Each structure stands twice: as structure tokens, then as C-alpha cells.
Image (cartoon, grey):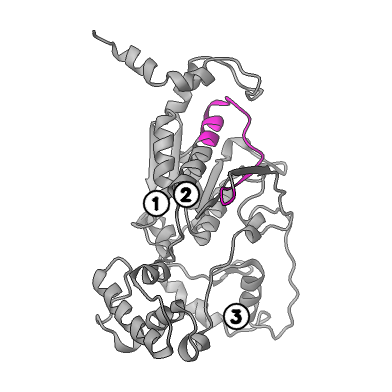
Amino acid sequence: MRVSVDENQSERWKDIRRFTDRPSAFAHPQFDAGPQNMEEIHKRRVLVVGAGGLGCEILKDLALSGFKNIEVIDMDTIDLSNLNRQFLFRESDIGKSKAQVAAEFIEKRFDIIICGLDSITARRWLNAVVCNLVEFDNGQPDFSTIVPMIDGGTEGFKGHSRIIIPYITPCVECTLDLYPPQVNFPLCTIAHTPRLPEHCVEYVKIILWEKEKPFGDEAIDGDNLKHVDWICEKAQERANEYGIQDVNHRLILGVLKRIIPAVASTNAIIAGSCALEALKLASNISISMNNYLNFTDIEGVNFGVVQLERNPECVVCGRAALTYTASSSTTLSEFLQEIKNKHQLVDPTVKGAGDMLYIINPMMPQMEDVSKANLKKALTG
């Protein structure tokens, strides 16, 4: 029996069409049942950031949900420290505002962004970019310039998914306290009184690698077997010296690459939630969740959706200016350290009355010497 292309296509999406082609009591008020909804899903442009365990599940679910225009950025290929250069920027953008270029890129190319990262730093950067592209009219956000972001994350048997509508729902920065800080060990403990197997690995990574330079000027590469073997050998020697057990390749890779334990079933559940929210946004078949889903199956399966609130003092989506008081002798370096500690920033850019005071950007190397020289100057200088 022959089956036409149209019949094949109809059969392929029949389960999705049960929701897109029929009226529903759970649909969004703007929902209009009909075949045009499936066509809209096909046309929507989706960016998936992260193609690890969670990201791959998200990609599969999106494809099975009818999305055809999908682009993916994988953090194993694009180094985190180079995200802003390799992900969005080109040579023609040198000298332009990073926020402006990134916003223009996303606004032109994508309707929905799904974040499947295990990096808080990358989440914050992408969140800032998405918020920066929103334009305002009489103090109100222009909805035509908003690109929604769906964020998913997993750790062992726990996970979350959330939907971020810039300036409408809380952004990543508003709820930064939900994310645990990265674990760092005191250098004095690593060097003199190691007690954990992780201390031994960190000692080799931070101190011994630079001291012995086993592979010349090569930086540590967690994917290079020779590097890992050398670190394993030295870490075991260190562990034996202090009577520490359980130093092995698995532990070393976890420390070097900051690997977060992954469970396939957790990834599948959170990915399904992310893809479902994307489907809702693209077709209005249902109202989006409001706005944070928490999942755990440590002791039975438990789901919970909570409505997080925006932080009016958020440095990304808060509209109010924040005021800091400093003495006349406070240096730029001291001021930077204060705002870094308060807002968990890494390398914030500081601009004075028309002049750039501090910016560390690989695309503007000429500014590095000027920026570092300004660190010693007083704010009133």
C-alpha cells in the first residue's frame, strides 16, 4: 500500500495534533484550535545551549514534538571562558557593545532559548544577554522584543525546570541563591594538611602542575589521557604520604572537569518538562507553568511548582539604580571587590562619565593595560 507524503506527515504528528487541533479547557486564552498551530511549531526557531546528558534529551524531545528549526551550542566544544567570543561575536563586532551585539544576534535568529547547562556562570551570562535585548516603551517592556528562556538542570536524583520571561518573571540573577556556590578548598589545606582525596587532586592541579610542567606549557586538559594519568600518579603519591584512600581516575575526572553526577531518568524527566514548556510557548496549547518546577525522586517521585518572585534590586532585570557610598580614598580595585562579593560577579565592566575605566575583554586587548593601571587609582582621582 502506498502512503502519500501528506498522509505520512499527518500520521507522524497525530499525537501532537490531538492538542493543537482541538479546543481545550486548559488552553491559553489566545489559543485557536486548528492545523495552523502545528505549522507554527514547525516554524519556530529554538536555540538549545548545552548538549550533554540533559541537552541531548531536550533535543530528542523537541524533534519529537514537531520543532524543525533547532540550533545547538555544546559547551564541550566552546570553552566556557570563551563563550562570549565563540558563541555570538565575530571580528566585525570588535569595539561594539557586547550586550548590544548579543541581543541583536538572538533577536534576529531565535524565538525560544532552552538552557541545559551545568554551569552557573554561563547561565548568568546568557540570562543577562536575553534581558539586555528587551526594549521599553514608556517604562513598559515591548513584548515583541522578548525572547523567553527555559532553564533546566539536574544533579543526581534532583532536577528543576523554569521559564524566564525577561522583566515579567524572575530571572536567573533574581534567584541566584538557589544555586549552590562552587566548592573551593583553602590553599593552605591543600598544601599542608590534606584530609580528603579531592585535596590531593587539587594539590597536583594547582601546585604541582605549574611547578613540574610535565608537558611543557600545556594547560591541564581533562580529556587528555596522558594528563589524567600523570595527575592520577602524583595524586596517589600524595594520598599515600598522608594516608588518604580512594584516589582514582573517576574521582580525578570529577575534580578536573567539575563533573556533576547524572541520572538518565532525571535527565529524561527534566528534558520532557523543558520541551513541553517550549511546545506551550510555540502553540498556546496550554498556559505556561508559573514558574519554577522542582523535582526529586530520592524517596518516591515528587514534583512541585512554585511561583518565584522577582527581586526589585536585581542587577540584571531590576530597573532601579543601586547606590554605593565610598570614601574619597577608595580605589577602583577595592570598589570592584565590593561589588564582586555582593553580587557574585567575576569581571564587571566599569564606565565613568563617558570613559571606560575597567574592561577585560579578549576582543579588546588594548584596554587591558589601561584597565589594570586604573585599579590602583582612587575613585575621585
From where the camera sits, is residue 135 visible? no
- Depicted 264 relative to depicted 85: above or below: above
Indicate the position of residue 241 as horizontal and vertical percent values.
Answer: 39, 90
- Residue 11 placement, left or right of 111: left
Which of these two is toward me, 159 or 338?
159
Give whichever of discs 1 and 2 has the lower sequence position.
1
CB under 8 Å between discs 1 and 2: yes
Q: Over which residues does the magenta segment extend? A: 276-299
Foreground mark, 2 or 3, reads 2
Give whichever of discs 3 and 1 has the lower sequence position.
1
Q: CA distance from mark 1 to mark 2?
A: 8 Å
Number of labelled discs?
3
Q: CA distance from mark 3 to mark 1?
A: 38 Å
Question: Dot 2 corresponds to which residue?
Answer: 116
The amino acid marked with disc number 2 is: Gly
The tag on residue 333 is 3
Q: The N terminus is located in which quarter?
A: top left
Indicate the position of residue 261 as horizontal and vertical percent values.
Answer: 45, 58
Question: Dot 1 corresponds to which residue?
Answer: 52
Which of these two is toward me, 175 or 157?
157
> Crowdedness of circle 2 by 10 Å Cα count: few (<14), some, many (20+)?
many
Q: The C terminus is located in which quarter?
A: bottom right
- Residue 204 placement, left or right of 335: left
Residue at x 36%, y 57% (from the top left corner):
76
Which of these two is toward me, 270 or 144?
270
Q: Does the magenta run of residues contain 293?
A: yes
The amino acid marked with disc number 3 is: Ser
Give whichever of discs 2 and 3 has the lower sequence position.
2
- Secondary structure under tag 3 reads helix
The tag on residue 247 is none
- Depicted 33 relative to depicted 78: above or below: above
